[in-house]
Image (spheres, grey):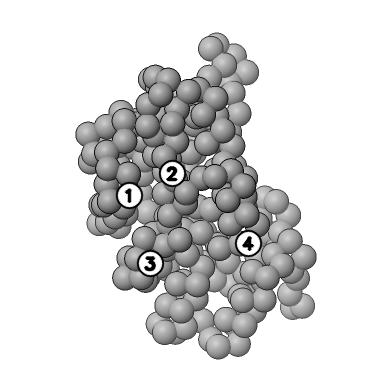
Amino acid sequence: MIFNKDTAEKTAELLLQINAIKLNPSNPFKWASGWNSPIYCDNRLTLSFPAIRNYIRDEFTKQIEEKYGKPDVIAGVATGAIGIGILVAEELGLPFVYVRPEPKKHGRQNQVEGFLQKGQNVVVVEDLISTGNSSLLAVEALKAAGANVKGMVAIFSYGFDIAQRNFEMADVELTTLSNYESLLNLAVAKQYITEEEIETLQEWRKNPSEWMVNI
């Protein structure tokens, strides 16, 4: 679910303005997963724009306080959400930890980096949700470390059905500042894309793993 419609539209517009989200239906991107995609999202770019990163920080802070009160710890998912997670933790005056994709191979072999006590309430900050698999692995690691995960907040979600199912199965509440539907609506209204291109973008989301474009 999105935080609210106005936030979703403004967040989408800011991401488009700085090319954190790139739309190119006629010349698709290749994701690390091997999927062909008419959209590419790199929300780490927001950290380079103080006004935008502060906006995202403030919206996350508002969202967390309204939904969860004040947790004990903010956790960021490595690597994309470490920067914004730290900003949120600083704004809330809370400790911060981050979660690696897998435990280190050396030293203490930590997967959760930072000081975390068993039983502490944690809200997880993520930058982007696709299938949700990597995000939910971070939740599992936090729970294994004894944390009480209250929920997850993210900047943007592609809105895949598989992600919704994954979060439901894991019983993790997800809220995002913006999503794919809000992005497409804004992109058409602001003439970032044509009506023909929006059809391509809508078709892609129905079956992204099999989607191809004839160019």
Measured Cα–Cα span from mark 4 to mark 1: 24 Å
Q: Which residue is mark 1?
A: 67
Q: Which mark is residue 161?
A: 4
- Classify 146 as above or below 154: above
Q: Which residue is mark 3?
A: 8
Most extreme residue toward the bottom, as rendered?
A: 195
Residue 83 is left or right of residue 87, and the answer is right
Residue pictured at 50% horizontal, 22% vertical: 145
Residue 86 is left or right of residue 140, and the answer is left
Give the foreground label among 4 and 3. 4
Q: Which mark is residue 151?
A: 2
Q: Does any portion of residue 82 appear in the rendered image?
A: no
Marks 1 and 2: CB-CB under 8 Å? yes
SS state under label 3: helix
Q: For the residue marked with disc 4, what is the amino acid?
A: Asp
Pick the quarter of the image with the N terminus: bottom left
Measured Cα–Cα span from mark 3 to mark 2: 19 Å
| Nearest to N terminus: mark 4 or mark 3 | 3
Q: For the residue marked with disc 2, what is the amino acid?
A: Gly
Measured Cα–Cα span from mark 1 to mark 2: 9 Å
Q: For the residue marked with disc 3, what is the amino acid?
A: Ala
Marks 4 and 1: CB-CB under 8 Å? no
Percent from the top left, x then y, of residue 57?
29, 49
| Nearest to N terminus: mark 4 or mark 1 | 1
